[in-house]
Image (spheres, rainbow, N blue to C red):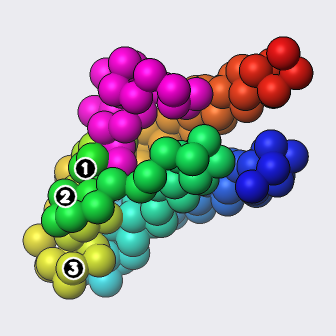
Amino acid sequence: MQLDRLREETEIEIDNLQEVVNDAKGLLETFASRPLTKPEVYGAGAMLGCFYTGVENLLSRFLKYQGIPLPTGEQWHDDLLGCFKAGALPDAALRFDESTLSVLGDLRKIRHVVRNRYAHLLRWDLLKPHLENLASLVEPLATCVRTALTELEQKQTR
């Protein structure tokens, strides 16, 4: 994969993440004055799951570009996220702080519940703060991604 293609694909993914954020804002506005039905709670969980899947797509693209093998095994989703902890992979261009990794880890768990047909366990009071937080998460994520791309570009020109 070429750096230009990585940049293009990550920008598309960031745009998709922003769309999920916009949808989450709409959902929060719509349901500010009444309780959600169970199917609506499922939908809210799916929205958070979509966001995390987009993040995971970004992470996978960075590893692929850098020739770093994707984790394998039963806990590969955990391990994938762990690859982006500062110092975990010396050559990884993209890194997140502990706070961001913690939030992303929570979203990964929500996605797991939704994808594995346990959505009946979702609770609005636990999902709502995550939906409210998406808007403040997407811009720092985008900044980290763009900074990493710039670092990769600088390495390429040396």
| Overall secondary structure of the magenta section | loop
Instruction: Give the x, y percent position of residue 117.
Output: 20, 84
The numbered dot on residue 75 is 2
Q: Label 2 is placed on what type of residue?
A: Gln
Q: Label 1 is placed on what type of residue?
A: Asp
Residue 99 drawn in magenta? yes
Which dot, 2 or 3, sits closer to the camera?
2
Image quarter where the C terminus lies is: top right
Q: How far apart are marks 2 and 1 (CA)?
A: 5 Å
Instruction: Give the x, y percent position of residue 16.
Output: 67, 59
Quarter-wise, where is residue 109 in the image?
A: bottom left
Instruction: Give the x, y percent position of residue 11.
Output: 77, 48
Which of the two labelled residues, at mark 2 and mark 3, occupies the earlier sequence position? 2
- Residue identifier under label 1: 78
Q: Is mark 2 on a helix, strand or loop?
A: loop
Question: Does any portion of residue 28 appear in the rendered image?
Answer: no
The numbered dot on residue 116 is 3
Q: Which of 89 and 40 is in front in this view?
A: 89
Q: What stretch is highlighted in magenta?
A: 80-103
Q: Nearer the viewer, residue 96 or 68?
A: 68
